[in-house]
Image (spheres, grey):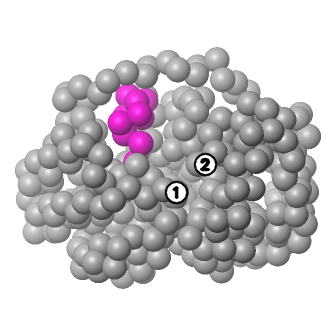
Amino acid sequence: MVDDKEYGKGVGMLDTQRMCEVAEKVVGQVLALKPGETVCILRDTEEESRPFTEIISTAARQAGAEPVSLIIVPRTVGGEELPEPVAGAFSRCNAVINIAKWPITHSRAVSAALAVGVRTCNLRGFNDGMLESPGVTTDYEPIRCNALAVDALLEQAREIRFTTADGCDVTMKLCGRKGKAQTGFADKPGTFSGLPDGEATVAPLEGTTQGCIVNPYIIDKIGRVDEPFRMEIKDGWIVNVEGGEQARRLLELFEKSDSNARRFASQFALGMNPDCRIFPDTKEVSKRLGTLHVALGDNISLGGAVQCGLHIDIVILNPTVWLDGKIVLEDGRLSI
């Protein structure tokens, strides 16, 4: 079982030694860059990203690869599209490293790059204490084994159901889509990963999700949920959102987005990393062993059929999960 007693532990300023350690792990393990390869390093105009960009560039050169730095205006939410020249550069390199503020995995630019064999690594949020997490430098071999094993179960299953003590009760159908495990490794063509990492994930069949989400831990772009929250889903669409400030902000986000932002669930994932913290940032807590996250909006990069300029993760603590009626996670404990 997991709780939020670890909230706030380990947060502080990153030092150069830690950034070098993580850069070497990205270059040597996650992407396994080879001599002669080209890697695009994407950052935004926030100046705190400059030192880490330079450290990663140095590590890439030491591996014999050629780094190319790209700088963009900060996006406002995960999944927002990137400038066309950036998308073009992605598809013409061997690997991509993102250290901008928001994730880019669910953008069309990354989907196109993955389709032609580009390897990608997402390191967004590094300047918010993320790289200090023990989940970044953990042993990823057992995480990879567990994530791939759960992915295989997701590919074979026909129905997911999950509940929580707070009242979450959601069912969704699966349709044999290939799992998209994030294992801490993106060393094969067309794979993506990041640090901290570790999840088994799949795109459920559109139009099949039913139920309600009650009092999740955190919602991308919205933040930590600290007031009553209830979201109702019918036939794969969000039909009602009630609660306090977080509910209001989510509804405002819907108003600014296209109608597909209300498509749910575009993703189902189980965290696999035991060393990630219960920490109010979806980048880390969504990878924590014993959590799950579901998403609304875009799922093209996961092999789904929903295209949208928005992808919002919702993280839930201590769920119980059934695949075709068999428990695989109970009160946050994995059972496979």
* Residue 167 seen: yes
Residue on which disc 1 sits = 77
| Front one among 147 and 313 | 313
Residue on which disc 2 sits = 220
Rate crowding at label 1 as few (under 14), some (14 to 19) or many (20 or more) other CA atoms within 10 Å: some
- The overriding secondary structure of the stretch rendered in magenta is helix
Determine the CA span between mark 1 and mark 2.
8 Å
Q: Is residue 124 left or right of residue 302?
A: left
Residue 210 position, x and y percent, is: 89, 63
Instruction: State the quadrant of the N terminus.
Output: top right
Q: Is residue 263 left or right of residue 37?
A: right
Mark 1 or mark 2, which has the lower sequence index? 1
Rate crowding at label 2 as few (under 14), some (14 to 19) or many (20 or more) other CA atoms within 10 Å: many
* Residue 327 seen: no
Q: Amino acid at mark 1?
A: Val
Please determine whether, in this image, residue 81 is positioned above or below residue 123: below
Residue at 14 percent across and 46 percent down: it is 54
Label pair 1/2, CB-CB below 8 angstroms: yes
Residue 263 position, x and y percent, is: 74, 69
The magenta-colored residue range is 124-133
Residue at 47 percent across and 46 percent down: it is 197
Q: Amino acid at mark 2?
A: Asp
Residue 120 sits in quarter: bottom left
Residue at 20 percent across and 36 percent down: it is 20
